[in-house]
Image (cartoon, rainbow, N blue to C red):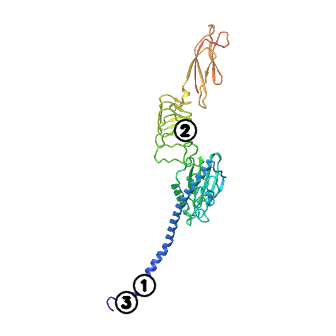
């Protein structure tokens, strides 16, 4: 065999190896086809979501213009379901409008025209015009995303909404829109979004155009709407607020500095000290792990519990106070003393805590008969008059019986218990 030539057997082996390599490469390519097809589907769907979001933004502008004309009185709408043609120019299927030219409408003729469907996802918009009387008007437009990857419908709906939000522009004063994904058709709250592919709201993209305060996603300065979600300030402060009216809990991770009165309708409980530059007031209990300190009054409708001291530069106001060391209420140990001259005088009963009755104690400081007669006995007669006691000093003359005398000085003590 000459040098440089290949035998027929060697050539056959080489051709066999080439065929095997081609078959292996072809099998790899065939195996990769489903993944490539899936990636192409995903890319196409994501692109479609952006297109749908742009058109939803354009639609929202038209819906806000429609509501603006309702406010201006140039449109007299009827509440209920409508279709997209309701907002198109008369020249391409819209209704006749006396205030607009036939070529003018609220949305362009070409918007959302895809054969038999209104959206590029092969479905129609559902549009509802709602009249809330004096509260205003609202238009809701929504569609359900159709995809050959059902589990991605929720993601696609979010991408539609994100794109629409980014391209919608700022509404005019008093008009607004809210873009929502994966929520019930009557929702105004983005937090109501579902992530469950089996949920009928999964995959829904919606715009709400309105002049109704309760629909507005932004808080209004005139207080005509409500906030339906929490504020997360991200470490920033709420400053220059006139007041905070909370019907639920206020949880503070650090100090609270209050320049005026503190009014707690129920109980106030802190783990450390309570410090106030002015009054501390609670209609219920005050709980402090350490001191309760106020430069003026401490006022509690019920109990004050302090692990250490209660300090006030002026007064501590309470119906009563309990001294643990002697197991007594203050009202049980403090007497109110008065000295009464004459007879038929009255003293007020003290206001005692529930379960403790008021008591009265008397002592004769001086006493004599009206005409200086000898005295064989002396006493104080106390009569219960409901909210007060009547005090009558009496003497027993030699011939009896007991008789009142105005020639007397009586010391009267009142306290609880």
Q: Nearer the viewer, mark 2 or mark 3?
A: 3
- Mark 1 lies on a secondary structure that is helix
Q: Secondary structure at mark 2?
A: loop
Asked if 93 appears above or below 136 in the picture, the reply is below
* Displayed quadrant of residue 123: bottom right
The x and y percentages for residue 69 are 61, 50
The tag earlier along the polypeptide, 2 or 1, is 1
Q: Which residue is mark 2?
A: 267
Residue 256, disc: none
Q: Residue at x 63, y 24 (%)?
A: 387
Residue 6 is situated, as x and y percent measured from the top left of the image, at 36, 88
Query: To which residue does mark 1 refer?
Result: 16
Q: Earlier in the sequence, mark 2 or mark 3?
A: 3
Residue at figure coordinates x 55%, y 63% from the top left: 151
Circle 1: is it few (<14), some (14-19), or many (20+) Cα within 10 Å?
few
Q: Seen in the image, is 242 located left or right of residue 80?
A: left
Q: In the structure shown, which secondary structural element does the residue marked by tag 3 occupy?
A: loop
CA distance separating discs 3 and 1: 14 Å
Along the line of sight, which residue is nearer the eye, 39 or 346? 39
What is the crowding at mark 3: few (fewer than 14 residues within 10 Å), some, or many (at least 20)?
Answer: few
Report the Cα–Cα distance between label 2 and label 1: 90 Å
Residue 7's mark? 3
Q: Tell us which disc is closer to us: 2 or 1.
A: 1
């Amino acid at each position: 065999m000459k040098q440089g030539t290949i035998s027929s057997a060697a050539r056959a082996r080489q051709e066999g190896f080439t065929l095997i390599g081609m078959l292996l490469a072809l099998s790899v390519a065939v195996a990769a086809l489903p993944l490539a097809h899936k990636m192409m589907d995903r890319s196409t769907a994501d692109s479609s979501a952006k297109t749908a979001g742009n058109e939803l933004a354009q639609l929202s502008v038209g819906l806000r213009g429609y509501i603006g004309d309702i406010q201006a009185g140039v449109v007299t709408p009827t509440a209920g379901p409508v279709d997209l043609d309701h907002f198109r120019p008369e020249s391409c299927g819209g209704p006749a409008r006396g205030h607009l030219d036939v070529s003018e409408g609220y949305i362009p003729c070409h918007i959302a025209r895809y054969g038999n469907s209104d959206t590029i996802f092969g479905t129609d918009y559902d549009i509802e015009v709602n009249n809330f009387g004096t509260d205003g008007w609202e238009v809701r437009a929504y569609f359900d995303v159709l995809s050959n990857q059902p589990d991605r419908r929720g993601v696609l709906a979010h991408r539609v909404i994100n794109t629409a939000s980014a391209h919608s522009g700022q509404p005019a004063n008093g008009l607004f829109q809210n873009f929502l994904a994966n929520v019930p058709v009557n929702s105004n709250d983005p937090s109501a979004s579902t992530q469950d592919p089996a949920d009928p709201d999964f995959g829904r993209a919606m715009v709400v155009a309105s002049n109704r305060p309760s629909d507005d996603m932004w808080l209004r300065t005139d207080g005509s709407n409500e906030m339906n979600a929490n504020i997360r300030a991200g470490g920033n402060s709420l400053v220059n607020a006139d007041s905070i009216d909370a019907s639920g809990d206020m949880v503070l991770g650090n100090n609270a500095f209050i320049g005026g009165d503190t009014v707690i309708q129920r109980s106030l409980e802190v783990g450390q000290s309570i410090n106030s530059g002015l009054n501390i007031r609670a209609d219920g209990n005050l709980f402090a792990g350490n001191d309760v300190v106020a430069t003026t009054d401490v006022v509690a409708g019920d109990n004050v519990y302090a692990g250490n001291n209660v300090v006030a530069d002026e007064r501590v106001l309470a119906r009563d106070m309990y001294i643990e060391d002697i197991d007594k209420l203050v009202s049980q140990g403090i007497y109110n003393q008065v000295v009464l001259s004459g007879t038929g005088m009255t003293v007020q009963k003290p206001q005692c805590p529930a379960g403790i009755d008021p008591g009265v104690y008397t002592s004769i400081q001086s006493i004599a008969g009206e005409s200086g007669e000898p005295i064989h006995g002396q006493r104080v007669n106390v009569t219960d008059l409901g909210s007060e006691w009547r005090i009558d000093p009496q003497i027993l003359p030699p011939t009896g019986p007991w008789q009142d005398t105005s020639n007397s000085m009586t010391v009267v003590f009142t306290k609880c218990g």
